[in-house]
Image (cartoon, helix red, strand yellow):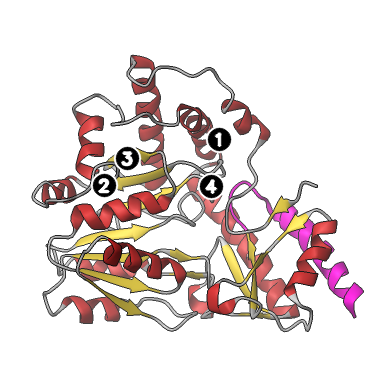
Amino acid sequence: MYKKLFIPGPVDVCPDVLKQLSRPIIGHRTKDISALQESISSKLQKIMFTDNTIILSTSSGSGLMEGAVRSFTAKRAAVFSIGAFGERWYKMCTANGIPADIIRSELGQPTTPEMVRNVLSGGQYDLITVTHNETATGIENPVGEISKVLKDFPDVIFCVDAVSSLGGAYIPVDEWKIDVCITSTQKCLALPPGMAIASVTDRAIEKAKTIPNRGLYFDFVELYKFVHDKAYQYPSTPSVSHMYALDFQLDRILSEGMIARSERHLEMAQRVRSWASKNAALYSNPEYLSVTVSCITNTLNIPFSELNAAMGKRGYLMSNGYGALKDVTFRIAHMGDNTVEDINAMLADLDEVIASFR
């Protein structure tokens, strides 16, 4: 039975977008594929509010995250963690032998500009990683405020994980001086999983050229070179089908308008927050709540597995809490092409399901 997805990725994909996956394959060393990649890049620049180079990767977002810490860390990385995906950044560093320290916030709390300033003031770090949106806790970090701190540390490369927010939240990459902004297709961009995206500054690439042992498949220098020296090519064979779908979906996003899209995401978030405040409790700091996923403390006295099973019979899928928050919280995502009407319909069914347990 098909279930409408209210999980923090993957998300439901428009049938017209799915049709693009069945288009005939073209050669990956042709002028046609270069034109397709150039079209994708120009559209992503508008959505990301950037003039920086756009990198594509046939992988999950984690691939480019790992590539980033390998490509841009010369001395030591400062990994700021607000949950599971900050922990992943740190695990990538240690797995690759990259010197790194992890600076953790309490679950449900953000990384603050003051934390970043305190850590960088010692001068031992040349790269920081920040999670813009943490799906495990439903927190959105104040990246715009953090970016103001980075102005005082011009030798530090600023890497941002926007996997679960870009295409839903407003992220002005150039205004925030983000050196490397990473996302993937299966969340707010509302595409099938399988492709990752990053914007990267020229200054980050120039630094990376001085760093040995960057790896190969996720080497940002190599990916950048094929965009510029090979006229919008990709070092290995890309997922052409994903590229067709991405190009098509980006037109739909731009037609809606990125500001309007971010406002729709906020409206969906506010509707879920209102429901959670009335019926249960929001888990995280209310001043830093995500616009793409809400983490709700389960005060319903209903085991989540039973609640989700009952919702499944009505054609919906929600998410349990993640890691330490499993069975303590549950999560309702509001991202991609979902509308406020979709949220209202799901919440109405959820109210009926909860009532049936009373």
Nearer to us: label 2 or label 4? 4
Sequence-wise first label, 1 or 3: 3
Let me know if residue 335 is in the magenta part.
yes
Residue at image x 49%, y 34%? 246
Q: Which quadrant: the C terminus?
A: bottom right
**How much space separates mark 1 and mark 4, taking CA atoms?**
15 Å
Nearer to us: label 2 or label 1? 2
Where disc 2 sits, the SS reads strand
Sequence-wise first label, 1 or 4: 4
Q: Is residue 2 above or below residue 248?
A: below
**How much space separates mark 2 and mark 4, taking CA atoms?**
21 Å
- Tag shown at residue 55: 3
Horizontal side, residue 48 vs residue 114: left or right: right
Residue at numbered disc 4: 186
**How much space separates mark 2 and mark 1, taking CA atoms?**
24 Å
Q: Position of residue 28 (x, y in %)?
A: 37, 21
Residue at numbered disc 1: 252
Q: Is residue 11 above or below residue 20?
A: below
Q: Are marks 3 and 4 in contact (CB under 8 Å)?
A: no
Q: What secondary structure prevails in the magenta region?
A: helix
Q: Are marks 2 and 1 in contact (CB under 8 Å)?
A: no
Q: Are marks 3 and 2 in contact (CB under 8 Å)?
A: yes
**How much space separates mark 3 and mark 2, taking CA atoms?**
7 Å
Q: Tell me the kind of residue under disc 3.
A: Ile
Nearer to us: label 1 or label 3? 3
Front residue of this view, candidates 285 and 2: 2
Residue at numbered disc 2: 200
Where disc 1 sits, the SS reads helix
Magenta-tinted stretch? 334-358
**How much space separates mark 1 and mark 3, taking CA atoms?**
21 Å
